[in-house]
Image (cartoon, rainbow, N blue to C red):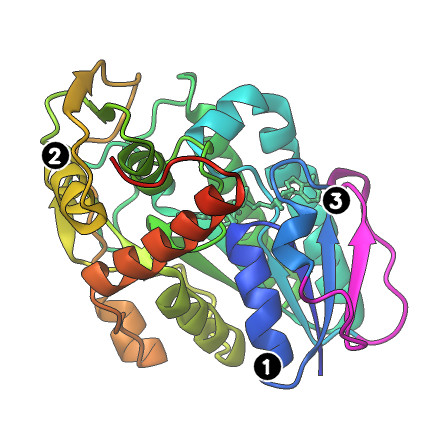
């Protein structure tokens, strides 16, 4: 079996490549390193069953030989990244997704599209089931990501409906773990970095906004179950354990032993107030639920960051 992972040098993509190799797949990783890093896959490049194609999926990708699975994960994903690259984000969701779907159709492969809880925008239904259509500002600063993913979902559904392409959509909620970039602007790496540096830990708004945090190993397990299934979805993948941003900051401060102060900073435009997946469908259709307690995931992620900070010669604790 041979799998192609777009965005394979990113945070989630690199974990997917690793797990696919472990379970016996040959893996082709496609990435242009816009937000990913060669370091994420450095431990895989010596593996003869791993191949890297450095290219921009917006222009398409040529792959010789059979492909049984396409995991389409290429896209900037952190708000800081997609606000910096709005056009590249829209284009990889549109043209990149079309190229991934064409490849899957040509090779007779199953495709899994990485969509997002951002498809629900600032939700007015809580928790969010897949049947909820969302509340997205189509012209706000975040729309380059939200609408790119909503278009990618529509395109995937249309290929499945009109061309019979075997494609399924997962809507991923906030996922965290090792290999997130310390400066990528997402809440978990930001708070861990600040706690380890002893700098102020920034919480947006009044800190009452909630997110549900899923550890990377659980997410990868859910994605692989979707790959083995034949349903189209969309299926939510996330951890229903909901935590406010203030609680998260306090939690990380306790786990790192940091004495950083927690400071409130303005809320970004269109920042969703609450997020929690309804995962009944994933449980029923994929037999999936997250197994890693959030605290265990945080401890593993902190340990990974501590190693990196020590490698960089920075002070680790305050
Ligand atoms: P990431 O930024 O770490 O990884 C994305 C990867 O895609 C990077 O390696 C980047 O270089 C690559 N890429 C971007 N544009 C490309 C292009 N045009 N051609 C080739 N490669 C390109 O982000 P991530 O957190 O690993 O997210 C991966 C996927 O999962 C994204 O599609 C994202 O929307 C989705 N997702 C992630 C989360 C999360 O919490 N991490 C939540 C919801 C959805």
Residue 42 horizontal/vertical position (percent): 69, 58
The residues colored magenta run 43-66
Disc nearest the viewer among 3 and 1: 1
Q: Judge whether 164 appears above or below 301 on screen.
A: below
Residue 314: % across, % down: 44, 35
**Which residue has dot 3 on it?**
57
The answer to whether the residues at label 2 and label 1 have Cβ atoms under 8 Å apart is no
Pointer 2 or 3: first along the chain: 3
Disc 2 is placed on an element classified as: helix
Q: Is residue 44 magenta?
A: yes
Quadrant holding ligand 1? top right
Measured in 3D between alpha carbons, the distance from the residue under mark 2 to the one under mark 3, in whole angstroms, is: 38 Å
Establish whether ligand 1 lies closer than 8 Å to the Cβ of label 3: yes
Q: Give the left or right position of residue 52, taking residue 130 as reference.
A: right
Label 2: how many residues lie within 10 Å, few (<14), some (14-19) or many (20+)? Answer: many
Q: Earlier in the sequence, mark 3 or mark 1?
A: 1
Rendered view: 53 above or below 280: above
Q: Which residue is mark 2?
A: 246
The picture places residue 302, in percent across and down from the top left corner, at 33, 52
């Amino acid at each position: 079996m041979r799998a192609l992972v777009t965005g394979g040098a990113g945070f989630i993509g690199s974990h997917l490549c690793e797990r696919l190799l472990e379970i016996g797949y040959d893996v082709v990783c496609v990435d242009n390193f816009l937000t990913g890093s060669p370091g994420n896959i450095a431990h895989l490049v010596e593996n003869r069953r791993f191949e890297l194609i450095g290219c921009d999926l917006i222009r398409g990708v040529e792959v010789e030989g059979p492909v049984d699975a396409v995991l389409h994960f290429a896209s900037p994903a952190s708000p800081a990244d997609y606000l910096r690259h709005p056009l590249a984000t829209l284009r990889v969701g549109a043209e990149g997704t079309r190229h991934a779907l064409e490849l899957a159709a040509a090779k007779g492969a199953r495709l899994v599209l990485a969509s997002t809880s951002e498809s629900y925008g600032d939700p007015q239904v809580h928790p969010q089931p897949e049947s909820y259509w969302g509340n997205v500002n189509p012209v706000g600063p975040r729309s380059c990501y939200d609408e790119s993913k909503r278009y990618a979902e529509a395109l995937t559904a249309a290929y499945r409906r009109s061309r019979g392409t075997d494609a399924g959509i997962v809507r991923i909620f906030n996922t965290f773990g090792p290999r997130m970039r310390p400066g990528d602007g997402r809440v978990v790496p930001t708070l861990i970095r600040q706690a380890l540096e002893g700098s102020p830990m920034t919480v947006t708004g009044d800190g009452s906004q909630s997110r549900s945090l899923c550890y990377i190993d659980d997410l990868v397990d859910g994605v692989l179950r979707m790959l083995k299934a034949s349903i189209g979805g969309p299926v939510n993948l996330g951890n229903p354990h909901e935590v406010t941003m203030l609680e998260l900051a306090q939690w990380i401060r306790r786990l790192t032993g940091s004495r950083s102060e927690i400071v409130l900073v303005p809320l970004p435009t269109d920042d969703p107030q609450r997020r929690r997946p309804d995962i009944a469908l994933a449980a029923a259709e994929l037999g999936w639920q997250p197994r890693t307690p959030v605290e265990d995931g945080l401890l593993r992620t902190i340990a990974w960051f501590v190693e990196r900070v020590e490698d960089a010669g920075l002070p680790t604790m305050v």
